[in-house]
Amino acid sequence: MQTVNNSIDLNCDMGESFGSWKMGRDAEILPLVSSINVACGFHAGDPATMFEIVSLADELDVSIGAHPSYPDLQGFGRRDMNLSPKEVYEAVAYQISALSGICAIQGTKLRHVKPHGALYNRSARDSAVANAVATAVLDFDNSLILYGLSGSLSISEAKEIGLETASEVFADRTYSSDGSLTPRTETGALISKSDLALDQVVSIVENGTVTAADGSRVELESDTVCIHGDGPHALKFAEAIRSGLDTRGIEVSSEF
């Protein structure tokens, strides 16, 4: 079988602890992935957590990205908000600046930006929000890479203004026939078995297609595969996917 990709970036959302409340198994997952998306305080995370995760990632040579969100700590950034494009721009720019500053203090560099939760989903389908996110990234540092849902407005709007992009696919989420993610409110939106998650990743990486929830085949470009760090199966998924990719001779790397 001929592979579409000989290498793939494996990313994970991290740094989502807050104060005494802990989430995820970041230190255990970090050695298995090639890039991470660090919460910047609006949906989760705090300064201490951001400093800690940046230090750990730098030690392991894992690429660091900002994971900006709507200002929604209570809803973990998963509630849609009707912010104006200006408000989206300012919120994203603020969060990127915070994490980039922490990276600079610790002698490392921010490499990419990936919106979180409802902001990610909104930017995938709303051109004004997608443009606001991309413009904030561009204005802050035009060398940063924008991670966005494969085939979505997040990618096309960023490319339109000259940003480098990474088309993202998901290991632990199912797809609708139009290439969008199945909404979390619907049954079957989440993949709970590591073998099924691995099968989905391999299909996307090797064939460039995924089987949607309705059984149809959807073509997807893929530069990076996401594992949600807050999921109960995150470590198990990361271990299975990394092992499966290694076995198939597919390099896990953030260089694409």
Image: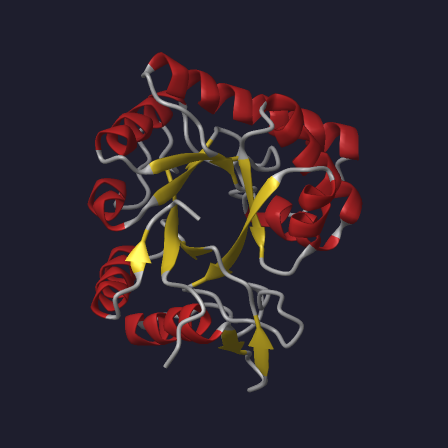
Count the marks.
Answer: 0
Q: Position of residue 169 (x, y in %)?
A: 49, 60
Q: Position of residue 22 (x, y in %)?
A: 30, 38
Along the viewing direction, whichever of 162 and 202 lies nearer the viewer: 162
Is 179 placed above or below 159 here?
below
- Residue under the point 73% across and 35% down: 132
Q: Position of residue 167 (x, y in %)?
A: 55, 54
Seen as rendered, the residue at the extreme bottom is: 215
Along the viewing direction, whichever of 88 and 60 lies nearer the viewer: 60
Determine if residue 233 is in view.
Answer: no
- Residue under the point 62% across and 25% down: 93
Tell me where residue 139 sits by quadrant. Answer: top right
Seen as rendered, the residue at the extreme top is: 105
Quadrant in which the N terminus is drawn? bottom left
- Residue under the point 58% across and 24% down: 141
Along the viewing direction, whichever of 248 and 66 lies nearer the viewer: 248
Is 251 placed above or below 46 here?
below
